[in-house]
Image: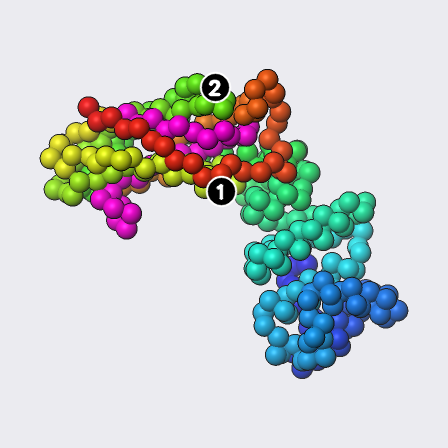
Amino acid sequence: MLEVGTGFHPELTGRENLYLNGAILGMRRAEIARKFDEIAAFAVVEKFIDTPVKHYSSGMYMRLAFAVAAYLEPEILVVDEVLAVGDAEFQKKCLGKMSDVAKGGRTVLLVSHNMGAIQTLCMRICLLRQGRLVFDGPADQGVAVYAGGERGNQADRWCRSAGAAPLSFTEISARLEGDQPCICLILDLRLRRTDTHSRAFLAVDLRDEVEVTLMQALPAGFLDADRVDHNVRVTVALPPLIPGRYWASLWVGPHNTETYDAVESAVCFEIITSPTPGRTFPHHRTHGWVVPHSWLEMCDT
């Protein structure tokens, strides 16, 4: 499925398009009739099945088109980014249906940049970069390779010259202290003032491998607007984290609607052990993500 709804005619009803599209995809009329009610129910268009599809909303149109394709029951189902559109409920149903297809012994080839969908559905990842195969293996490892390649290899120490902003980061170093489930991320920061600015505060955003924001840590205090150089130690108490790689981004500004400077994915760290004492296991796609949690201690010297 390179495009959902290929072969639909706007003047035909949903019923007529269902038979037409099914025939285009290789289904026999008797097979379509046997699955008709199930397909219409999956698409949630039963009440409008005899309405021309030109009157359908885009969501209704897509649900019916995907349902026809999903119920074709091919040996190999190739899906190219069709889940990039549609509402959350539609995407959830699509993932569930493709999972059912895979569990039935058939092959699903999903082409996507949605790492959440990849981890939910896939057991194996083939990662292509500039037309070359750079990884072929377990899904969790493939996501880590993809995320690392997208954001680059992050060092424990990051430096640069002061930017044009009134206040900017010039040096960032990081380390972890403690053990699960009580780990702290220690950040030693240097900032340089190049122009007059309002008093500003720091924020630290934590994201996982699939770009899900887990938390934002905000301090209670502000950076002194009169000081030229700031040497700041930030201690972020992390929530219990499942094994995997995580990225911390930093920004500084006078309030949440204005940013003086920001460093995306400035720090990368990896959690190896489970938050449950005495257990170690690899990251698994069915584990839930942590709830938002924020606590940050800042000391400007």
Q: Which residue is mark 1?
A: 212
Q: Please give the range of residues in magenta.
A: 233-260
Tell me, yes or no, whether the highlighted magenta stretch contains residue 213: no
Q: Nearer the viewer, residue 87 or 7?
A: 87
Using the rendered image of the protein, determine whether residue 65 is visible from the camera's viewpoint: no
Question: Residue 177, percent across and down?
Answer: 41, 19
**Which quarter of the image is occupied by the N terminus?**
bottom right
Residue sitting at x 60%, y 21%: 280
Tell me, yes or no, whether the highlighted magenta stretch contains residue 247: yes
Specify the amino acid type for callout 2: Asp
Give residue 143's mark.
none
**Which quarter of the image is occupied by the C terminus?**
top left
Residue 87 drawn above or below residue 222: below
Using the rendered image of the protein, determine whether residue 197 is visible from the camera's viewpoint: yes
Mark 2 vs mark 1, foreground winner is 2
Residue sitting at x 50%, y 29%: 240
3D distance between C-alphas at marks 2 and 1: 23 Å
First reached walking from the N terminus: tag 2 or tag 1: 2
Specify the amino acid type for callout 1: Val
Give the quarter of the image for residue 228.
top left
Residue 113 drawn above or below residue 148: below
Q: Which residue is mark 2?
A: 179
